[in-house]
Amino acid sequence: MAHRPQGVAEGPAPVAPDAAGTVEARAVRIRTGLGVACAAAVFVIAALVGNRDTAEPNPGGPAGPDVAAGERTIAVARVAVSSSITLVGTVGPGKTVAAVAPFDGVIGERRAQLGAPVEAGDVLVVMEAGEVGTRLREAQAASLKSAMAVALLDRWADSPDVVRARRALEAAEASLLLNQRQVAETKKLLDRGIVSRNEYDGLVQQRDMQRNTVAGARLDLQAALDRGSADNRRLAEFELQNATSRLADLQAQADGGVVRAPVAGIVTRPPAGGQSGSPPVTIEAGARLSRGQPLFSIADTTTLVVIGRADEIDVNRIRIGQAVSIRGDAFPGDPIPGRIVAISAEADAGPAGGRIPTFEVRAAFSGRANARPHPIRIGMSARMEIETAANPGAIVVPIEAVQDPATRPSVRVRDPRNDAIESRSVVLGPTNARGIEIVEGLEPGDIVIY
């Protein structure tokens, strides 16, 4: 068992009076420092809150005495606004001209390639002319015969048929005169009893028969003359015209055996469905074609178009002649100006229960835009930005400044004379990126609170 020194009591060691005073002073200083720090923190928080309240936007100037904390004001002024529609489409030619087979026949040689540029008059296809040559010669023979028939009718009175009929009549009349003279002479002999009655009656019968022959010859002559009438001549002229037209048509077909590009442009595929129900024919040497069957289409790139589609809401905001800005990822740079040239009057509804009906919209622009560093090619995608409305002096307020916009739209306006706030009815216009246009109810200089 340990022994404690005598005279020392148990418990904590006593503190000297000077040491105790020092500890108490330190505690007072700590409490004082904490109080100062808390006061400073409260002051900073109050300052921050004050600064946040005073930092709210107030574009229109200082809020009046009736403006609640956190509300904003805006001074009404006229600004230029516009709205537009953007449609995505495909670049196509302004027009296409089809090159077709000139006649029924076989391709002898193909010289054009799809996608190749051509000039007007360049050879596309050479046709074999064997079959059309035979038909051409037949048409030449028919035309020659018709021309001879018309020439014969022009001098029909002296034609062989009329001359022959006239001579037959003259011969019949001469025979009749002879028979009549014989009958007269025999009658005298009969009266004197020189000839018999039977001989006289035979001569009379011959005379009567000759009279019938003369009558028939006259009818034959008249029939021959009638064949040269005006109606028959017109008929012969019509036949000549038909033969001449047929000959000219076949001659044009034969001359068109070398199919040339009708205009300058790009060689593209022929229109689909050129021959109803017939399968597509490969345009190569040896292929048999029918007259009028499309061979190629020549895309005239003097003018290009962008073909897009607008829904049933946007289409009513588009008008022919509206300005269009055309852009494309494949031909970057400044937008290309164009104009709306066509709006379909019929919707492409698609399959039943499918997508919303759309309407085709075409915008045209100059093909000279191909002078850009990145040429514009047929089939590229493009965007059409169509400006549907523009107002250089519109009054626009934020959308949230309008109260009850669906039924009775109004805005809160501060009266500059007495700083009173009133609710003013307004007429709304279209919305845009800046807000909503006020058509009626506000004037420049009004202070709107929202």
Image (cartoon, helix red, strand yellow):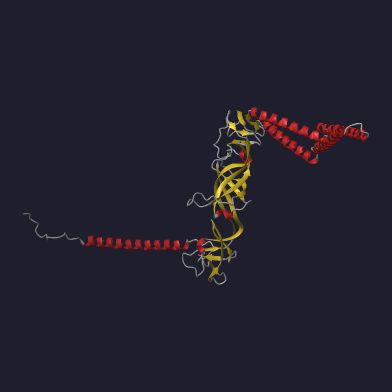
**Count of picture labels:** 0
The foreground one among 350 and 16 is: 350
* 428, above or below 268, in the image: below
Image-quadrant location for residue 119: top right
* 56, above or below 344, in the image: below
- Does any portion of residue 189 appear in the rendered image? yes
* 15, above or below 273, in the image: below
The residue located at (7%, 55%) in the rendering is: 3
Q: Position of residue 44 (x, y in %)?
A: 40, 61
- Report the side of 17 relative to 187 (left or right): left
- Report the side of 236 relative to 399 (left or right): right
Q: Position of residue 350 (x, y in %)?
A: 51, 49
The extreme left residue here reads: 1
In what quadrant of the picture does the N terminus appear?
bottom left
The foreground one among 181 and 174 is: 181
The foreground one among 384 and 55 is: 384
Image-quadrant location for residue 126: top right
Q: Position of residue 201 (x, y in %)?
A: 86, 35
- Does any portion of residue 83 appear in the rendered image? no
The foreground one among 286 and 319 is: 286
The residue located at (52%, 51%) in the rendering is: 349
Q: Position of residue 277 (x, y in %)?
A: 55, 39
- Report the side of 377 relative to 69 (left or right): right
